């Protein structure tokens, strides 16, 4: 029988494949996020990674930026185990601290020079909980620090949302052997996630204390925003 870590690593490999189908610009998004962070931090940056499960931010940014340190937060122990294992495989684990829980649950003794929250906010159910997460991140950042938020977004009652959903499904059909029925089932699951509109996302970021809030990409159901904690 496979041990737990091997099982988790296999799940992570599946995740790495699946996320690039769900979000075809996943790697390009990472390159843009890295350029934004690099442009706005000093050499020795302490980066807070919300939803660090799977380790892709920590490993991608950690390898390319040897003077950065990372605090990875995620409620999923299995996903964090994978993040730590990937960091060890790349020899960067000394620059990585891992925290199990949500960002509000952790009593950090440090502040951060940058933060990312990639592909997490649509799992946070209510507007109040989303705002609480964003406010907590803002409080942990040094004034003026860069922050990147990437999430599924949109108003499900609008026709433009259906168009984006149809494109999302067409991409799955083109890239995989899944049937129309399979993809319709995936649509049902995705529609149960917590979507809010781009306007609401921008309002929440501003209410949480971020400024210069700017959308920098949109791919099918996903959007990304850059911002700075206020001074
Ligand atoms: C789709 S994965 C994204 C992983 C990684 N950020 C990436 O871009 O590939 C979503 C992650 O968010 C985590 N998550 C869910 N709710 C969270 C919360 N309230 N705070 C932090 N992480 C959360 C999940 O456990 C999961 O590891």
Image: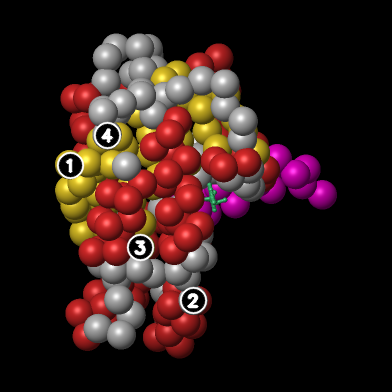
Of the two numbered discs 3 and 4 on the same chain, state the one appearing first in sequence. Answer: 3
Tell me how far mark 1 sits from mark 4, CA to CA: 9 Å
Q: Is residue 144 something that shows in the picture? A: yes
Tell me how far mark 4 sits from mark 2, CA to CA: 33 Å
Element class at badge 2: loop
Identify the residue position indicated by label 3 in the image.
Answer: 152
- Find out whether residue 18 is within the magenta segment: no
Instruction: Judge whether 157 appears above or below 84 on screen.
Output: below
Of the two numbered discs 3 and 1 on the same chain, state the one appearing first in sequence. Answer: 3
Q: Is residue 27 left or right of residue 180?
A: left
Identify the residue position indicated by label 1 in the image.
Answer: 212
Label 1, residues with CA under 10 Å away: few <14, some 14-19, many ≥20: some
For this rendering, which residue is in front, 50 or 95? 50
> Any mark on residue 230, and which?
4
Of badges 3 and 4, the one in the foreground is: 4
Q: Quadrant of residue 18?
A: bottom left
């Amino acid at each position: 029988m496979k041990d737990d870590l091997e099982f988790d690593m296999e799940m992570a490999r599946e995740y790495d494949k699946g996320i690039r189908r769900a979000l075809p610009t996943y790697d390009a998004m990472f390159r843009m996020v890295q350029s934004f962070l690099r442009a706005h931090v000093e050499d020795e940056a302490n980066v807070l990674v919300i939803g660090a499960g799977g380790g892709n931010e920590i490993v991608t940014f950690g390898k390319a930026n040897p003077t950065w340190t990372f605090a990875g937060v995620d409620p999923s122990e299995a996903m964090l185990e994978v993040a730590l294992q990937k960091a060890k495989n790349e020899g960067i684990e000394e620059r990585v601290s891992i925290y199990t829980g949500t960002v509000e649950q952790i009593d950090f003794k440090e502040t951060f020079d940058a933060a990312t929250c990639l592909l997490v906010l649509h799992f946070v159910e209510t507007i109040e909980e989303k705002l609480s997460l964003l406010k907590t991140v803002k409080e942990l950042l040094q004034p003026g620090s860069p922050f990147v938020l990437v999430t599924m977004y949109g108003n499900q009652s609008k026709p433009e949302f259906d168009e984006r959903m149809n494109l999302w499904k067409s991409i799955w059909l083109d890239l995989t052997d899944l049937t129309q029925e399979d993809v319709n089932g995936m649509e049902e699951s995705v529609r149960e996630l917590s979507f809010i509109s781009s306007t609401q996302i921008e309002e929440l970021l501003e209410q949480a204390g971020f400024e210069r809030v700017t959308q920098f990409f949109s791919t099918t159901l996903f959007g990304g925003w850059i911002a700075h904690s206020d001074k």
